[in-house]
């Protein structure tokens, strides 16, 4: 067993465990912490794939910004204090069985995958430059449309926040 394989298995277990915990814990802050574990371990998997730029973006955007925005959104909204029913035994068994079936199907799918490549593509060669070239040549229009959509969402959030202030 190589060190790379051991790191992959460890990071994959942390990612899956974080996802399962996020679905099964009841407190919102615990859900966010398990989500952060999942995001950071996925960033570690990107590092193993020699995609350091994507790993850095994963940590900065998802582990940082998105998680904080989700936490603020949950904390600032009004909640009704309702008693939650305890999770039943059958739900836990069904969840575990579903995870096992999904893992088996992914395992079978990966080992039966035929990519049809005869020559290996060069890895570890200017990954960030290749992403930038693809983003600003082939995918320029979707990139710009995404930035306009995000700007419209930001303006909409400001307008909604101002209306709530005026109503009070």
Image (cartoon, rainbow, N blue to C red):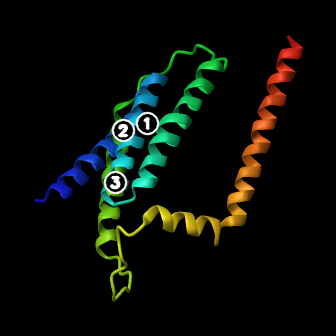
The answer to whether the residue labelled 2 contacts the one labelled 1, judged by CB atoms less than 8 Å apart, is yes
Q: Outermost residue toward the top?
A: 168
The answer to whether the residue labelled 2 contacts the one labelled 3, judged by CB atoms less than 8 Å apart, is no
The residue shown at (75%, 49%) is: 149
Q: Nearer the viewer, residue 80 or 35?
A: 35
- Mark 1 element type: helix
Nearest to the eye among marks 1 and 3: give it.
3
Q: CA–CA distance between discs 1 and 3?
A: 19 Å
The spot of residue 9 in percent (x, y) is 23, 52
Sequence-first tag of 2 and 3: 2
Instruction: Name the residue that disc number 2 marks.
Output: 18
The residue shown at (44%, 29%) is: 31
* Neighbour tally class for label 2: few under 14, some 14-19, many 20 plus, Cα within 10 Å: many
The spot of residue 49 in percent (x, y) is 34, 61
The spot of residue 59 in percent (x, y) is 44, 42
Q: In which image quadrant can residue 80 be found?
A: top right
For residue 136, side relative to residue 30 (left or right) = right
The residue shown at (76%, 44%) is: 151
- Mark 3 element type: helix
Sequence-first tag of 2 and 1: 2
Q: Nearer the viewer, residue 76 or 21?
A: 76
Instruction: Name the residue that disc number 3 marks.
Output: 47
The spot of residue 11 in percent (x, y) is 28, 47
């Amino acid at each position: 067993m190589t060190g790379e394989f051991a790191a992959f298995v460890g990071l994959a277990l942390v990612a899956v465990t974080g996802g399962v915990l996020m679905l099964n814990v009841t407190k919102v802050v615990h859900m966010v912490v398990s989500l952060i574990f999942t995001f950071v371990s996925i960033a570690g998997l990107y590092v193993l794939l020699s995609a350091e730029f994507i790993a850095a973006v994963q940590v900065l955007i998802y582990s940082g910004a998105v998680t904080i925005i989700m936490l603020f959104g949950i904390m600032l909204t009004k909640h009704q204090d309702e008693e939650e029913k305890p999770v039943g035994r059958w739900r836990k068994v069904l969840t575990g069985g579903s995870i096992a079936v999904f893992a088996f199907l992914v395992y079978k799918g990966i080992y039966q995958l035929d990519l049809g490549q005869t020559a290996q593509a060069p890895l570890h060669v200017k990954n960030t430059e290749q992403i930038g070239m693809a983003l600003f040549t082939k995918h320029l229009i979707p990139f710009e449309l995404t930035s306009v959509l995000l700007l419209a969402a930001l303006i909409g959030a400001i307008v909604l926040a101002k209306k709530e202030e005026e109503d009070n």
